[in-house]
Amino acid sequence: MKNEITKTEKKVIMAEVIFVIGIFAFLFFLTTPSQVYPLHGMTIIEPNFNIEIEYGEEVLISIDENFTNPVILKEDSEITLPPGVYYWKVTSGFRGSEVQSFIIKTHVGLDIKEREENYELQNSGNVDLNITKNKQGITSSMALEVGESEEVEKDDAEYEGRQS
């Protein structure tokens, strides 16, 4: 008995090696980090939105395409971004996705919730608000930062919110 490998066996082994390398290469490129949401060039109005990715560990967000001072987000990170243009990419180890951009549009929002004894004014937008209260010709004002709320007297006043 000889322990030599025949030409046919060498071809089969070589085909198996090429097949396994091909599978690993396919999986490597298939699992490249990628962005799902927001889409490239998308304009976002909602102050609260989720970034969706595939096969990534970190999201880098920057105000410039070169990512000079990026914000790095990991799973379950939360951040409030002011209106503007942002560039982002996804990384996983030494691999990264292409750079894409999205725009956060200015959104002014003032919610007034009626309570038992008062009203609650809440800034539901993504910019700071100046709120004007007009009651029988007397005007007063207050400021609310993004996400902030204020309780006010329950009366027949009119409230108007404008971007600071």
Image (cartoon, rainbow, N blue to C red):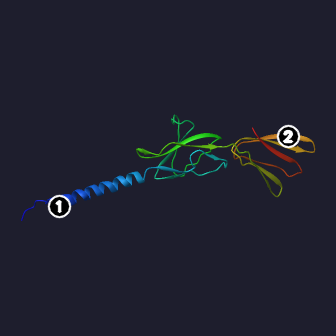
Q: Position of residue 19 (x, y in %)?
A: 29, 57
Q: Residue at x 83, y 46 (%)?
A: 159
For disc 2, the marked residue is: 140
Relative to 117, residue 61 above or below? above
Q: Any mark on residue 8, and which? A: 1
Who is closer to the viewer here, 57 or 31?
31
Upstream in sequence: badge 1 or badge 2: 1
Who is closer to the viewer here, 142 or 30?
30
Q: Looking at this rendering, what residue extends furthest in the left direction? A: 1
Which picture quadrant has residue 140? top right
> Label 1 sits on what residue type?
Thr
Real-space Cα separation, disc 1 to disc 2, in angstroms: 92 Å
Who is closer to the viewer here, 155 or 90?
90
- At mark 1, the secondary structure is helix
Quarter holding the N terminus is bottom left
Is residue 53 rendered to the left or right of residue 29? right
Q: Residue at x 50, y 44 (%)?
A: 89
Is residue 32 rendered to the left or right of residue 20? right
Q: Decide: marks 1, 2 in contact (CB < 8 A)?
A: no
